[in-house]
Image (cartoon, rainbow, N blue to C red):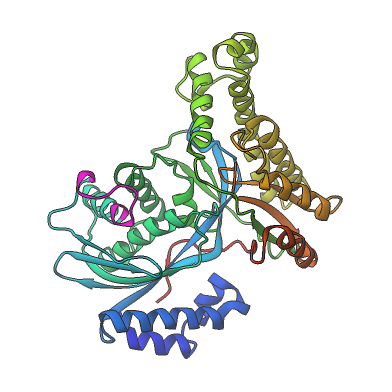
Amino acid sequence: MNTVLQLKNALLGGAYDDMLARLYGEAGVRAAAARCASLADTFAARFGAQRQVVLLSVPGRSELSGNHTDHNHGCVIAASIDLDMIAIASPREDGMICMESEGFPAETISLSPLPTPSDVVAGTSGALIAGMADGFAQSGLAYGGFDACATSDVLRGSGLSSSAAYEVMIGTIFNYLYCGGSVDAVTIAKLSQRAENQFFGKPCGLMDQTACAVGGMVAIDFAQPAEPVVEPIAFDMTGAGYALCIVDTGGNHADLTPDYAAIPAEMKAVAAALGCDVLRGADEAALIAAIPALRAQVGDRAVLRALHFMAENKRVELQAAALRAGDLDAYFAEVLSSGRSSFCYLQNVYTTANLREQGLSLALALAERVLGGKRAAWRVHGGGFAGTIQAYVPLSDVAEFCGTMEAVFGAGSCHVLHIRPVGAVKIA
């Protein structure tokens, strides 16, 4: 390891330009080097310029296919993006962790003894740190104390998984400080989900953590959630001439928990009526035959959401095959089909609790106005109800698309992203 001062000089001298180009593109190398060097200054001021350090990066992620399928053991396609969390970390021998993230209070955790879920405050970053340490310990993996400074441009509340990037970062710090980088990405993803479930208190699936840790485009099958099947998809969306645009409509996420929770609950109610725990185990023909009884038992919306799941799970397979074949027309057709299904059947584009606010519906209408008739596609992104839409925009149309969206939703609401080929990684 280098000292933090040596790291800064190497960054500004171009020693890591090749790695930075992989993560941020050739045009982003100098800005990335300056950002990392600035973080080195922060670490030096806080912990000392002679500390031996590593520099790490964990990307955010975007869901490309499989809207609300993972919680019923379905399939998804996800991708890491070129917004990330970076951290500079140095080991310490006293079993203490001090994690300082820009814009947030520092978290200090003692590993002796290891904290339990009852020792931490649920919903905090400290709970995630404790959960990752416990996960490494329970898995027989080496871990220990460290000091770290981090900064992130993964947008909070935008469906790009800032929390998953954080917990994967803690696992990546343990991995490179104490395990020699030997822990595979899927293991870190599983331990991250465990930390979020058991310590943070959020019953999330595994898609976000897997996409952040593994990187690139990945198809993930959650038929066996403890052992998800992760298959890379080699497709260069930027090379094909497209930007992945995320439009933040600025919707209010407050009081939407019942809307989000109702989706898996209603899907599982249909599954239970068909004798299964989750919809992945249900027979579609049996579902169709049971609709008359299901309408009275669980309601029409639950049936529609189950039908969305059945179609969406098949759609993921079709889209993965289209990408592997380089068939963008087929892929985009399924993106649009997914968006229609989410709007009509899954019904997660606006909340019925506030019909005046339909920012996602408006953004989708504007996307169709700009991109309709072109080789492009758009859909709701992530959980829905408020937040973001996703669009595949030809590079020649990005300025018009962003201009239209920002005129309505505000400056900076349209984020032009690119799919990053690398997941959690040591830069230096």
Residue at point 35%, 88% (across, down): 6
Left or right of 248: which side holds 326? right
Answer whether residue 266 is visible to the viewer in this image.
Answer: yes
**Relative to residue 300, is residue 258 depicted above or below?**
below
Magenta residues (range):
117-128
- Quarter of the image with the N terminus is bottom left
Tell which residue pokes out farthest to the right in this image: 373
Percent x, y of residue 252: 56, 48
Percent x, y of residue 395: 76, 66
125 in the magenta segment:
yes
Answer whether residue 3 is visible to the viewer in this image.
Answer: no
Percent x, y of residue 146: 24, 68
Which quadrant of the view contains residue 316? top right
**Relative to residue 5, is residue 285 depicted above or below?**
above
Nearest the eye: 303 or 279:
303
Which quadrant of the view contains residue 194? top left
